[in-house]
Image (tube, rainbow, N blue to C red):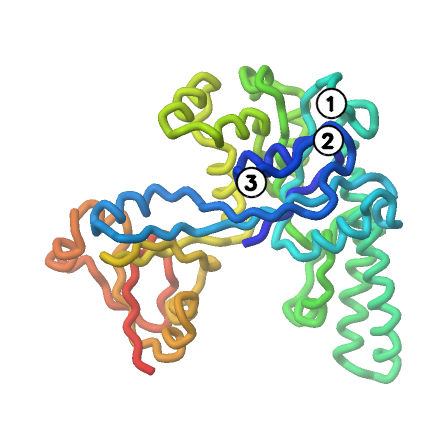
Amino acid sequence: MKLGIVGLPNVGKSTLFNAITKAGAESANYPFCTIEPNVGTVLVPDERLEVLTKMYDALKTTYATIEFVDIAGLVKGASRGEGLGNKFLSHIREVDAIVHVVRCFEDKNIVHVEGKIDPLSDIETINLELILADIETVDKRLERAQKGAKSGDKKAILEVNALKKIKDSLEASKPARQVELSEEEQETLKDLFLLTSKKVIYIANVNEDQLKDIENDKNVNIVKELAKSEETFCIPLCAKLEEELSELDDEDKLLLMQDFGLQHSGLDELATKSYDLLGLMSYLTAGKQEVRAWTIKKNTKAPQAAGKIHTDFERGFIKAEIVSYDTLIECGSMLQAKEKGLVRLEGKEYIVQDGDIILFKFNV
């Protein structure tokens, strides 16, 4: 899973990137500090893996991962190449979802490109540039599709209808992801890679003082309401504090989080919400050699889940030996779970559940 961190210049993108990757990306008080995107891969925290590693005395533990891409700040006119617009747009096309960092804090020492703190205006600036870029993409594709439609090509006719729906939405300042398309229409446009078709999580970046009364913060609640209207998530956090937390050992990290009343780190919540947003989950494999989390789409059937490990597992799939994580923990061991008849054999139609511990049986 690849997430692109975007936003206006100087909203805290690189600070957040530093916090969640410990990569030390350059963060400075001037626009376009980030020119080429910084990329970092981070582990997705999962307490289940820690428990299973102890249970099996495993030699290796492999967590699911998220790749974060810190993309250059966007400004008005980016769709026409202003600032680093063209580079920004090309980098964002490659990600699975967007983490939109919105500045909700006041700080006279950190310049704001618009000269004032206005979360909705900032979000609209980004969205407008993405919409304008998508209109240009749709127009080019529509011109080509209309030529095919004139000759009676059924696929081209279907494509024209789908493109017109999207164009109408974009011209009404609504993103492509809000357009309802049939499966056939989606198939014809699967290589269009529209920027506004990507799902978005909003990060309301605050300062440490705001954390003390975050529920009543005006700017944060503005972003939350917008996210709710778009049926997505808003995560309030202090990127600066998250960066400090990332440099501490577990004990000191916990103490500092308690000081601010935090139950989870920003990365924990971002990872969880990202999985929910993209319809992802993890199944687990466990043994002496390795305990591992495998990321799959929800509603994935057993053979396709097996294919995440190796294509031979999917091709030669016979059965899947499965026990849920909670059941295994209640029993205390795999042997106890088997003796109680709680380890199941499932076939090709079984839909894998989050936290399933699976041993695949196959023959190639």
Q: Upstream in the sequence, badge 3 or badge 2?
A: 2
Q: Residue at x 30, y 54 (%)?
A: 291
Give how far across and how far down residue 44 sits, in percent.
45, 45
Q: Is residue 119 left or right of residue 298?
A: right
**Residue that badge 1 annotates:** 110
Question: How many other residues sit within 10 Å of disc 2, few (<14), some (14-19) or many (≥20)?
Answer: many
Whole-percent x, y for residue 104 in the image: 68, 25
In percent of width and height, residue 58 lies at 25, 52
| Element type where label 1 sits in the image | loop
The residues bearing labels 1 and 2 have C-alpha atoms spaced at a distance of 7 Å
Residue 251's quadrant in the figure? top left
Amino acid under disc 1: Ile
Contact (CB < 8 A) between labels 1 and 2? yes
Badge 2 marks a residue whose secondary structure is loop
Name the amino acid type tagged 2.
Answer: Asn
Between the C-alphas of marks 3 and 1, the distance is 22 Å
Q: Nearer the viewer, mark 3 or mark 2?
A: 3
Residue at (75, 35) in percent of width and height = 9
Q: Is residue 343 above or below residue 257?
A: below
Q: Is residue 26 left or right of residue 172?
A: left
Q: Quadrant of residue 187?
A: bottom right
Q: Give the tally of numbered discs.
A: 3
Q: Nearer the viewer, mark 3 or mark 1?
A: 3
Residue at which label 3 appears: 23
Q: Is residue 114 left or right of residue 175?
A: right
Is residue 300 placed above or below 246 in the rendered structure?
Answer: below
Q: Earlier in the sequence, mark 3 or mark 1?
A: 3
The type of residue carrying mark 3 is Ala
Residue, disc 2: 10
Q: Residue 48, which numbered label?
A: none
Q: Residues within 10 Å of mark 3 (few under 14, many from 20)?
A: some
